[in-house]
Amino acid sequence: MKQLPKTITFIMENGVLTPKTSLDKYYHDNYLKNVEEGTVLQVTYEYKDDDGTYPQISKLQACTRELSRFLGYTHEEVKDMIKKDSGLYNEDKSLKSFAECSKEELSRAIDAVITLGELVDYPLD
């Protein structure tokens, strides 16, 4: 039976990955219960913290690339516009890399790129 992807949080305890909460354990056990023999599953391990997520960075990269093509600017120029508009500066006043940003900062940048798209009549949602 084909199932939708499921995110389950694990914690490393004594060298063993264990579902973090009882709900995570429930999801894990029930997901595996419905997997047929011979089914191939893809598992991605990602540290969970307050840092920005890969999906956020991917969305920003895709949106800024699309917008740069539409506007006729380079990808770097559009990324810099979005970073400035979102206030993504290091302590030395240089622009942050999206990879250095928190979830909140990346959310602001995503909002900024979507807003810019709307302003130039190029919706990115």
Image (spheres, helix red, strand yellow):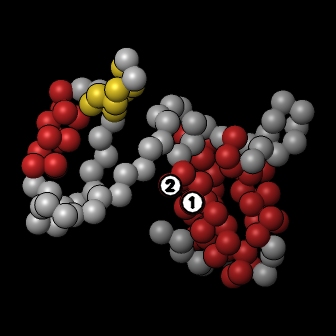
Above or below residue 74? Residue 60 is: above
Circles 1 and 2: CB atoms closer than 8 Å: yes
Residue type (three-letter) at the residue carrying disc 1: Ser
Rendered position, 60 above or below 95: below
Left or right, residue 115 beside residue 18: right
* Left or right of 15 in this view: 53: right
Graded by Cα atoms within 10 Å as few (under 14), some (14 to 19) or many (20 or more), the crowding at tag 2 reads few
119 vs 84, nearest the viewer = 84
Res. 115 visible in picture: no
Residue occupying the point 21% across, 64% down = 39
**Amino acid, disc 2:** Pro
Q: Position of residue 105 (x, y in %)?
A: 62, 41
Work out which quarter of the rendered image holds the N terminus and state it: bottom left
**Residue furthest front in the image:** 38
Circle 1 is placed at which residue position? 58
Residue positioned 18% across, 27% down in the render? 22
Tell me if I can see residue 69 in this picture: yes
The part of the image, by quadrant, that contains residue 95 is top right
Q: Position of residue 20 (x, y in %)?
A: 29, 27
> What is the secondary structure assignment of the residue under circle 1?
helix
Q: Secondary structure at mark 2?
A: helix
Q: Which residue is mark 2?
A: 55
* Image position, residue 21 (x, y; %): 24, 26
The residue lying toward the viewer, choosing from 121 and 3, is: 3
